Image: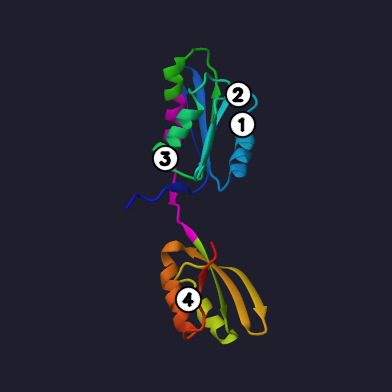
């Protein structure tokens, strides 16, 4: 079984001074492209020489060299994200030029290395695949069902009452679905069946 990808527990930063240039990596967990681009806008420093960045959220990824020679900044940052087994992460590396040219190889090492060190030092969280289940239960079964949610690490996504009972949508880790479905059948004495919604 392959290791679960990780995301960051929260925003983090790491700074390096390389041949008189200052490199500041700032990283954050993100759930979407829009959130990644919003973070880039938020932390980019207009007084800096370059604000290079990369993000990955599932199959979606992008990177930007922000005026550095092509392939010397954004791509190495993306490679740092992937090399650390991270997903749902954005990294911005800001550079203040110090007067000494680093050359293409030096830039790749500076941007990629600063990003990798930032991610390496950060607190991580495993990314858990979530599922949504839908079910209908009687009023009498609702409290029994709610009492089991913690066991399944489940949250109520929506709850709609009707004349016959309650329509529920639960969100829970995929690894808990089979157990939850079996217990729901027990609680409802075979009448209630939880179905996948995603």
Q: Marks 1 and 4, how far apart in space?
A: 46 Å
Q: Are marks 4 and 2 in contact (CB under 8 Å)?
A: no
Give the extent of the magenta segment: 110-130
**Residue neighbourhood size for the residue with mark 4, other residues' Cα within 10 Å, grouped as few (<14), some (14–19), many (≥20):** some
Q: Which residue carries the number 3 mark?
A: 121
Is tag 3's residue or tag 4's residue first in the polypeptide sequence? 3
- Residue 148 shows which numbered tag? 4
- Residue 79 shows which numbered tag? none
**Residue neighbourhood size for the residue with mark 3, other residues' Cα within 10 Å, grouped as few (<14), some (14–19), many (≥20):** few
Q: Where residue 56 sits in the image (x, y, percent)?
A: 51, 40
Considering only vertical position in the picture, is 6 above or below 101?
below
Q: Which residue carries the number 1 mark?
A: 44
- Mark 1 secondary-structure assignment: loop
Q: Which residue carries the number 2 mark?
A: 48
Q: Are marks 1 and 2 in contact (CB under 8 Å)?
A: yes
Q: Where residue 59 sits in the image (x, y, percent)?
A: 50, 43
Q: Nearer the viewer, mark 4 or mark 2?
A: 4
Q: Residue at x 50, y 68 (%)?
A: 154
Q: Where residue 119 sits in the image (x, y, percent)?
A: 44, 39
Is tag 1's residue or tag 3's residue first in the polypeptide sequence? 1
**Residue neighbourhood size for the residue with mark 1, other residues' Cα within 10 Å, grouped as few (<14), some (14–19), many (≥20):** some
- Mark 2 secondary-structure assignment: loop
Q: Residue at x 54, y 24 (%)?
A: 95
The reply to whether residue 15 is in sight is no
- Mark 4 secondary-structure assignment: helix
Is residue 161 located in the magenta-colored stretch of the structure? no
The quadrant holding residue 116 is top left
Q: Are marks 1 and 3 in contact (CB under 8 Å)?
A: no
């Amino acid at each position: 079984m392959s290791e679960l990808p990780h995301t960051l527990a929260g925003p983090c930063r790491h700074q390096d001074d390389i041949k008189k240039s200052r490199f500041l990596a700032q990283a954050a967990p993100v759930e979407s492209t829009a959130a990644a681009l919003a973070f880039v806008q938020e932390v980019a420093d207009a007084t800096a020489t370059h604000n290079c960045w990369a993000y990955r959220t599932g199959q979606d990824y992008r990177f930007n060299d922000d005026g550095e020679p092509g392939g010397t900044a954004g791509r190495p940052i993306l490679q740092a994200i992937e090399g650390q087994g991270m997903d749902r992460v954005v990294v911005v590396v800001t550079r203040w030029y110090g007067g000494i040219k680093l050359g293409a190889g030096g830039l790749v090492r500076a941007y990629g290395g600063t990003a990798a060190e930032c991610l390496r030092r950060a607190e991580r969280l495993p990314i858990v695949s979530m599922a949504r289940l839908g079910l209908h239960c009687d009023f009498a079964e609702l409290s029994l069902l709610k009492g089991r949610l913690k066991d399944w690490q489940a949250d109520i996504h929506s709850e709609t009452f009707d004349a016959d009972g309650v329509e529920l949508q639960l969100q829970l880790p995929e690894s808990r679905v089979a157990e939850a479905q079996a217990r729901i059948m027990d609680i409802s004495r075979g009448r209630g069946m939880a179905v996948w919604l995603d």
